[in-house]
Amino acid sequence: MNYAASGTAAVAFESANERTVLALSNVTKTYEGTPPVHAIRGIDLDIRSGELVAIVGPSGSGKSTLLHVIGTLDRATSGTVEVAGYNVDDLSDKQLSSLRSRHIGFVFQQFFLLAGETALDNVADGMLYTGMALSERRILAEQALSQVGLSHRMNHEATKLSGGERQRVAIARALIGSPDIILADEPTGNLDSKSGEAVMRLIEDLNADGTTIVVITHDHEIASQFPRKVSLLDGKIVEDTRPVDDGHSS
Amino acid sequence: MNVTLEPSRLAPADMMRASLIGLRTRRLRSILSGLGIVIGIAAMVGVLGLSESSKSDLLAQLDQLGTNMLRIEAGTGIGIGSGELPEDSISMVARVAPVEQVASISNTEAKVYRNDLVPSGQTGGISVKAVDINLLATLQGEMGSGVFLDEAARDLPVAVLGSVAAERLGVADGTSGTVVWLGQEWFSVVGVMDTLDLSPDLDRAALVSYSAAEEFLDHDGVPSTIYVRSDPDDIDAVRSVLPATVNPESPDEVEVTRPSDALEAKEAADQAFTNLLLGLGAVALLVGGVGIANVMVISVLERRGEIGLRRALGATKGHISIQFLGESLILATLGGLGGVALGSAVTAAYAWSQGWDVLIPTVAVVGGLAAALIIGVIAGLYPAMRAARVSPTEALRTL
C-alpha cells in the first residue's frame, strides 16, 4: 500500500523550490497547562538540500521542541511543516512513521545504541522499519560505517565502543538510508572535546558529500563553525545567518 | 520529489529479532520470570503424565486380575446376621447359570505359630482359614513357591501360606519342607502364595483344606466368604441374584462386593488428588503469568529510550506493541517448552522407577504449550499497550 502524499502541496512545493527539504511556516507549539507553555512561536524556516545548519539557543529556548516538530515526533499546534515535500498536517501517525523511516535520520546526544548488538546491526537498524531484508541492510550498513571511518569496528558490540565511536555508529545509523535530512540533537554533548571535534569534522565531511544536516546545540562556539546558524530565544528565531550567495536572505 | 510514501514495515524475521533483544540482554531476569511458567507447566504435564501412567498400570492390573469376580460374605454386626453363610450356599451359587467358578473360605479359631514353643499370644496377626482347593484358580492367584492344596493332600496336615504370613513366620519358601505349629498339630508348608491383589486378607493367612480343618482342627466347615467367577457380560445380573440365592430367607444378611471396585475406587481417589495437583499447577502458571507481566512492565519503563529510538527510526505504535507482545510470548513459550520437558522427564523417571509404562498424554503437552501461549499473550498485552502509548518525545528525554 502506498500512502498518498499531500499531493497538491507536495507538487506545488516541489515546483517552487526543488531543493527545499524542510519548510516551516509560522509554526507554533504550545503545551497545555496552567499557564500554557509556548515552546516555539511563529517559526519560519526553510532548509535546502545540502545545507549544514546549526540551531542554537540556551536551555528552554525551544530547540528540542523544534527538533521534535521538524523530526515529526511531535505535531505543531499551528502553522505548516513540510518535510521532504510532505505536508505533515496531512499525514496520519502511521504515515509520519513511514516518513521518518525513509526521509529523516536522527542522531541523539545519548547515542541510543542497542545493547548486545554489533555496530553493524545497530547501523542496519537505521532501515529496520523499511521492510528491507537484514542481509541487504547489512551491506548498506557496511558502507555507512566505512563512511564514518569505523569499518574496523563493525563486528564489535556497539555499546562497548568508546564514546566517540559510539556516536559515529549512531551517525552511520542516521546516514544509512540516505535520508533527505539528518537531525542531530547535541551530538557532541556526551563526548570529550577531542571526540567532539572528531564528530564535528565527520559531520562537516558528510555535509561536503551532499548530506543535509541540522545540528541542535546550546554551544555557540560549535554553532559558529557552521555555514548557517539559526539562533533561538524564547521560542523565536532571533538570528538566521543563511549565506547570501544562494539567493536567499535571512 | 516523492509523491507517494511507502508504509513502515517490519519483516517477520526482524520482528522476532526485536522481540528477542530484551531476553538476550536481560538473561537472568528472563530466566527467573520464565521459571514460573516452567514450574506451572511441568506440574501439569507431570501430574497428567503420572496419572495416565498409573492408570495404565491399574488397567493392566485389572485386566490381569479380571473384573468378573464377586465376593460373598455374611453380614456381621448387630442385627445383620451371624457372620456365617448357609451350609448349602456353595451348591446354590454354583447353580446360577453364568457362574463359572465358585470357591469358599471358612474362618477357623485356630492359630499358627513357627513352632510349639512360641507363646500363644504371639499370633503375628495371622489367621487360619479352611479353603476349597480350587480357591487359587478362582482368584487367579499365583504361587510364589511350592504348590497349592490339591486332591492328593486334602486330607493331610498341610498348609499354604499367604505372602505376608510366610514372611512373619519366617518361612522362606514352600519347598523346603518347613513345618508350622497350627492348631495343636504340626502342619507341613507346601507352598507360599504370591500377593493377591483382589484378596489382601489372604496374604495374612495360613490356608488348609476343609477336610484337614475338620479332621485336625475340629472345624465345622461353614463358609464365611465365597468367591465367584462369572461370565463378565452377566456380572451385574449374577450380582443381583446372589443374595437371595445364598440366603433365600434373609437376603439382606448377605453382602456381595466386587473386589476390583476397590481398585477402581482407589483410582478415583487418586483422580481427586490429581485434580488437586492440577489446580496447584494452574495456580503456579497464573503466578508465572503475573511474573512475566511484572517483568514486562518494568522492561517497558526501563526501555523508554529504546522505544523512543524505534519510533524515531520509523516504528509505528503497532510495531512497538508487537515487539513487546512478542517478547512476552517468546518468554512464555520457552517457559512452556521447558515445563513440558521437565514434566515429561519427571514423569518418565517416576514411571520408570515404579515399573509403569511411560505415558505422556498429548493433551498435556499440547494443552501445556497452549496454556503457556495464552498466558504469554495475556501477560504481554498490557505492557505492550503501555509501550505503544509511550510518547516518543518523552521517551527520548529519558536518561
Image (spheres, coloured by chain):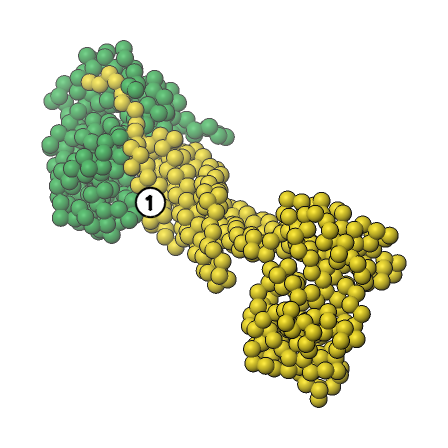
In the image, residue B334 above or below residue B101 = above
Give the colour in which the image draws chain A.
Answer: green
Of residues B297 and B308, the one nearer the viewer is B297
Q: Where residue B381 sits in the image (x, y, percent)?
A: 46, 37
Of residues B360 and B228, the one nearer the viewer is B228
Q: Where residue B332 sits in the image (x, y, percent)?
A: 43, 45
For this view, does B155 lie left or right of residue B29? right
Q: Quadrant of the N terminus of chain B?
A: top left
Q: Where residue B348 sits in the image (x, y, percent)?
A: 45, 57
The amino acid type, in three-letter code, at marker 1 is Ile
Residue at 80% over, 70% down? B220
Chain displayed in yellow: B
Do we see residue B191 in this rendering? yes
Do we see residue B368 in this rendering? no
Mark 1 belongs to chain = B
Name of the residue lying farthest toward the bottom: B117
- Residue of label 1: B21
Residue at 84% over, 51% down? B248
Q: Describe the element under mark 1 as helix, strand or loop.
A: helix
